């Protein structure tokens, strides 16, 4: 008993005073990128705050307005900015979680240092906790840099301190869960890119899944409390718990100060107003469970010899079929024929879960529900873009890590050939998820709920966006040695272009045009055309309306109704913008390859 | 075939290759030796167009490594000291991958891959995953890979490391055979006796400086040590080995001679390579030769004498 207590008491020390942690921290401290990240982040923050001050000086210059109006205006602006910063910060941190750790174990395995670790008395839990803490401490540092700055903004009437606290807590809990998932998948996946994708998908499943189920269950009145013989508020509580699982949803509720439908019967008033606390707790709980699972998984890895193994004779036929596909593009061939799923049954499990979920959604919500198509459209675009953003970032770095890069550079393939092959192969691997995404709309079109020609236009939105992030990912992969840095840069680019630009535009409008008015419509429409999410939403909205029989509905561009040719031009402009960006990144990659790709001539 | 003139490569303050000049003809096997960190791998990387020399020029088959990388890559086979393997390929696929990368037509690939697998004795492992191979087998696969496109020049960075004794002998025979086929080889190794046996010339490098380049005999001469021969003498007749040794040592063609338990230990003077001299002297003293064993030139001696063994 006392022995057990002593073990428990020394657990934190044993976990944290740990050579793995010390080594990782030392290496991170030596890395220049650590400081660049911190400086960049602080700069971004300062930038935002300068904007607030700029806004203020401008607002104080207004002559005619009453003091009360000015004060209100100021409060509104500061509030908007604070929320914008909070949301961008949250998105960055939440998406970075899996990226931070996805390479942690598989890199060690590839470098054959895992075997060495296995011969030391370090426990698997120490390895997992050490790596997790070391890699998360950067995120914690960033969050801690941000919090006081945002709190300082309150002087000008920003948002309540508790809201800021809620954002920081939920963001850190989300990154903890993401990082824990990253390390778990890293322990049994061979490459960090694969581990990243899996961790993202699981994170999405754990956070968004319960919310969707709760939402549908609520609206469909699945359970009849009276029939089940339980108090009505218990059910409401369970459904609300579903919403609590999703960090962004909770933050929206926290931000708006709205009561969730149904309230929290039976829970104390104090806690009912601090739902974010419950969410944080729930995330931390899940993450801790994942850490324990990951430690188990690492233990299995440590004791099991690496068995690349001989290919069974039964598979020999399959191998030669694979070889038959090898023509004049070996780099493309190798990457595109590599298994996306380490085991075949993984694919069936993933497809099965997806099919079950969609089937259930089809049955429950029905194809005639417009917001359902919008939801699929948005999540599909977001997911495909995210997948594209992480699938080339390891293309060069992983070859460098496996030391195959040098060998590849001595073959007479041109840089252009190698880079284009990498992008083509990554695109090829995204065909399956892309096809599934399209399948939904094709089925909906076949059933007459959406119009077919709009469905045909969906790839015009999605493909260029994917190509853009594939190309930028390749560029970052060439620019940075570490896969983590490349992935992080690409995801930050994605967040900047999707959220950051919007925020900037709004703030600039505020500063330049004294709030919205003069240029509002033009800028609004331009932003709409610029943003893939908006364009896709516009397209799907038309598809639904037209599908519902409103024959002569027009397309929506922000607040304007336009005809198909005009919308097509807008679509072309957006696709062109992304394709141009992709070409630019490819060009940059090529120059980077020539300059320091490792070839002398 | 290979002309390096006064190349220099620095990494920050560190001079990895310093004013190195070297010329090799086709069909030569050049053994490249030097202590750790001497600059062997760096030199090879410059020849493989992976690194750009800061000064000087390097030419392969008349082509400048700075400008004609695309053409040089077609005629060289470079095997790095660390073999990178694609973990998701089988041996067969790995070789086909490179065959395709070198632009071999599809129809020829099968035969070529079969050929190099046979040559490197890996046929039995053709369906194994590359990363499941033992280190020595991976090393052989590396050699198989560089032979796929039948290059004129082979740059092999420590090809024998990790090989078992039998495989090492086979590797040596393979490399000798490749030299006979007219290929030019640059082979670095730490196992000096091996290089001594197969190289037509050697180079000793330390701290980026080429201390010596030439034949092994030259290296031997350079350190002032001639060929050494162990002779056993039939001593039934009561031959006086001590006296014989002293007498032979007086000859100007002999650097030294001493008596052993069963015979004599004779070293030829530098510049003298004919073993017949020793036989002549022995017969002149009417000694009966039971056995006559020329000692393999001791490259280690040359190496130790010429290099100081300092790490840079
Ligand atoms: N990329 C690099 N950056 C910095 N220094 C390097 C780099 N590559 C090599 N060096 C340095 O250049 C020197 C020569 O290295 P090189 O690899 O050519 O030696 P080597 O003769 O091949 O040694 P070994 O026998 O150990 O393989 C070493 O001091 C090494 O530390
Ligand atoms: Mg070396």
Image: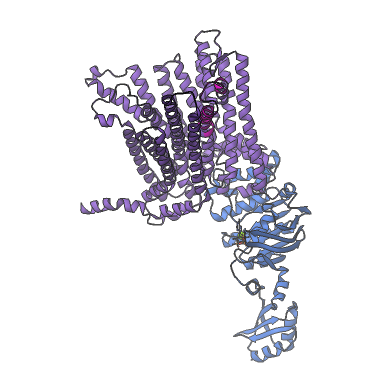
Chain colours: A purple, B blue
Instruction: Residue lying at the far right in this picture: please name it.
Output: B62
Rendered position, B189 above or below B61: below
Q: Nearer the viewer, residue A400 or A53?
A: A53
Indicate the position of residue A405 as horizontal and vertical percent values. Answer: 61, 47
Q: Which residues are magenta?
A: A496-524
Q: Nearer the viewer, residue A249 or B86?
A: A249
Res A191 visible: no
Name the quadrant containing residue A66: top left
Q: Please identify the quarter of the rendering in which residue A334 is found.
A: top right
A378 above or below A469?
above
Query: Taking A568 as reference, is A293 left or right?
Result: left
Residue A520 among those drawn in magenta: yes
Counting from the top left corner in percent of width and height, residue A284 is at 34, 39
**What is the tally of numbered marks visible in this picture?**
0
Please provide percent x and percent y for residue A249.
39, 28
- Residue situated in front as seen by the camera: A327 or A129: A129
Compared to residue A419, the image places residue B60 above or below, namely below
Q: Is residue A336 above or below residue A555?
A: below
Residue A63 seen by the camera:
yes
Specify the principal SS of the magenta part. helix
Residue B246 in the magenta stretch? The answer is: no
Query: What residue is shown at x 48% (from left), y 43% (from top)?
Result: A42
Quadrant assignment for ligand 2: bottom right
For residue B231, which quarter of the picture? Answer: bottom right
């Amino acid at each position: 008993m006392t022995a057990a207590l002593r073990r428990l008491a020394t657990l934190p020390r044993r976990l944290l005073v740990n050579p793995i942690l010390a080594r990782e921290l030392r290496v991170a401290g030596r890395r220049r990128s650590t400081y660049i990240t911190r400086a960049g982040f602080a700069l971004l923050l300062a930038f935002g705050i300068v904007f607030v001050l700029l806004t203020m000086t401008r607002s104080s210059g207004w002559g005619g307005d009453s003091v009360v109006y000015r004060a209100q205006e100021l409060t509104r602006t500061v509030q908007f900015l604070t929320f914008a910063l909070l949301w961008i910060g949250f998105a960055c941190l939440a998406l970075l979680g899996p990226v931070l750790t996805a390479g942690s174990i598989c890199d060690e395995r590839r470098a054959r240092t895992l075997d060495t670790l296995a011969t030391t008395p370090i426990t698997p839990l120490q390895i997992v906790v050490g790596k997790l803490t070391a890699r998360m401490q950067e995120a914690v540092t960033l969050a801690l840099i941000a919090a006081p700055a945002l709190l300082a903004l309150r002087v000008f009437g920003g948002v309540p301190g508790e809201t800021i606290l809620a954002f920081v807590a939920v963001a850190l809990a989300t990154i903890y869960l993401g990082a824990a998932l990253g390390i778990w998948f890293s322990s049994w996946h061979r490459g960090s890119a694969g581990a990243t994708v899996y961790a993202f998908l699981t994170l999405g499943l754990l956070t968004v899944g319960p919310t969707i189920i709760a939402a549908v269950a609520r609206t469909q009145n699945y359970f009849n409390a009276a029939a089940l013989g339980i108090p009505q508020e218990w059910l409401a509580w369970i459904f609300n718990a579903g919403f609590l699982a999703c960090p962004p949803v909770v933050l929206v509720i926290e931000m708006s100060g709205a009561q969730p439908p149904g309230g929290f019967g039976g829970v104390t008033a104090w806690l009912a107003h601090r739902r974010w606390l419950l969410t944080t707790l729930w995330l931390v709980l899940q993450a801790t469970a994942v850490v324990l699972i990951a430690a188990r998984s690492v233990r299995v890895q440590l004791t099991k010899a690496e068995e690349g193994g001989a290919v069974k004779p039964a598979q020999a036929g399959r191998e030669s079929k694979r070889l038959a596909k090898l023509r004049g593009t070996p780099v493309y061939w190798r990457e595109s024929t590599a298994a996306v799923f380490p085991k075949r049954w993984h694919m069936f499990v993933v497809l099965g879960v997806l099919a079950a979920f969609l089937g259930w959604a089809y049955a429950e919500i029905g194809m005639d529900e417009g917001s359902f198509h919008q939801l699929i459209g948005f999540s599909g675009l977001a997911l495909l873009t995210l997948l594209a953003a992480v699938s080339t970032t390891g293309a060069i770095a992983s070859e460098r890590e496996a030391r195959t890069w040098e060998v590849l550079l001595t073959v007479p393939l041109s840089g252009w050939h190698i880079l284009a092959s990498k992008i083509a192969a990554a695109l090829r691997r995204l065909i399956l998820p892309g096809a599934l995404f399209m399948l939904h709309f094709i089925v909906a079109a076949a059933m007459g709920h959406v119009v077919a020609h709009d469905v045909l236009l969906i790839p015009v939105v999605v493909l260029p966006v994917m190509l853009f992030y594939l190309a930028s990912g390749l560029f970052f992969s060439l620019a940075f040695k570490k896969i983590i840095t490349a992935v992080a840069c690409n995801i930050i680019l994605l967040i900047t272009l999707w959220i950051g630009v919007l925020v900037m535009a709004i703030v600039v409008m505020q500063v330049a045009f004294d709030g919205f008015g003069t240029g509002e419509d033009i800028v609004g429409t331009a932003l709409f055309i610029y943003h893939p999410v908006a364009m896709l939403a516009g397209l799907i909205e038309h598809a639904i309306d037209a599908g519902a029989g409103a024959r002569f509905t027009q397309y929506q561009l922000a607040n304007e109704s336009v005809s198909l040719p005009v919308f097509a031009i807008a679509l072309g402009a957006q696709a062109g913008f992304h394709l141009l960006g992709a070409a630019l990144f490819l060009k940059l990659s090529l120059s980077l390859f020539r300059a320091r790709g490792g070839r002398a001539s | 075939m290979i002309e390096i003139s006064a190349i220099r490569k620095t990494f920050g303050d560190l001079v990895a290759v310093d004013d190195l000049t070297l010329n090799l003809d086709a069909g030569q096997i050049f053994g490249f030796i030097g202590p750790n960190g001497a600059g062997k791998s760096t030199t090879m990387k410059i020849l493989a167009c992976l690194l750009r020399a800061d000064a000087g020029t390097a030419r392969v088959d008349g082509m400048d490594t700075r400008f004609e990388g695309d053409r040089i890559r077609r005629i060289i086979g470079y095997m790095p000291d660390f073999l990178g393997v694609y973990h998701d390929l089988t041996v067969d696929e790995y070789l086909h991958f490179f065959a395709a990368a070198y632009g071999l037509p599809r129809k020829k690939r099968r035969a070529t891959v079969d050929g190099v697998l046979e040559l490197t004795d890996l046929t039995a492992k053709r369906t194994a995953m590359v990363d499941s191979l033992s280190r020595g087998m991976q090393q052989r696969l590396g050699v198989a890979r560089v032979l796929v496109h039948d290059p004129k020049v082979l740059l092999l960075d420590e090809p024998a490391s990790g090989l078992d004794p039998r495989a090492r002998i086979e590797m040596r025979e393979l490399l000798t055979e490749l030299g006979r086929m007219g290929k030019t080889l640059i082979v670095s190794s730490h196992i000096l006796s091996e290089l001594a046996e197969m190289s037509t010339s050697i180079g000793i490098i330390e701290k980026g400086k080429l201390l010596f380049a030439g034949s092994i005999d030259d290296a031997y001469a350079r350190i002032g040590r001639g060929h050494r021969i162990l002779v056993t003498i039939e001593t039934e007749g009561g031959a006086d080995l001590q006296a014989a040794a002293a007498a032979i040592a007086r000859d100007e063609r002999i650097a030294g001679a001493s008596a052993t338990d069963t015979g004599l230990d004779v070293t030829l003077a530098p510049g003298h390579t004919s073993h017949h001299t020793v036989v002549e002297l022995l017969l002149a003293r009417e000694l009966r030769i039971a056995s006559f064993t020329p000692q393999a030139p001791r490259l280690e001696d040359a190496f130790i004498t010429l290099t100081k063994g300092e790490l840079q």
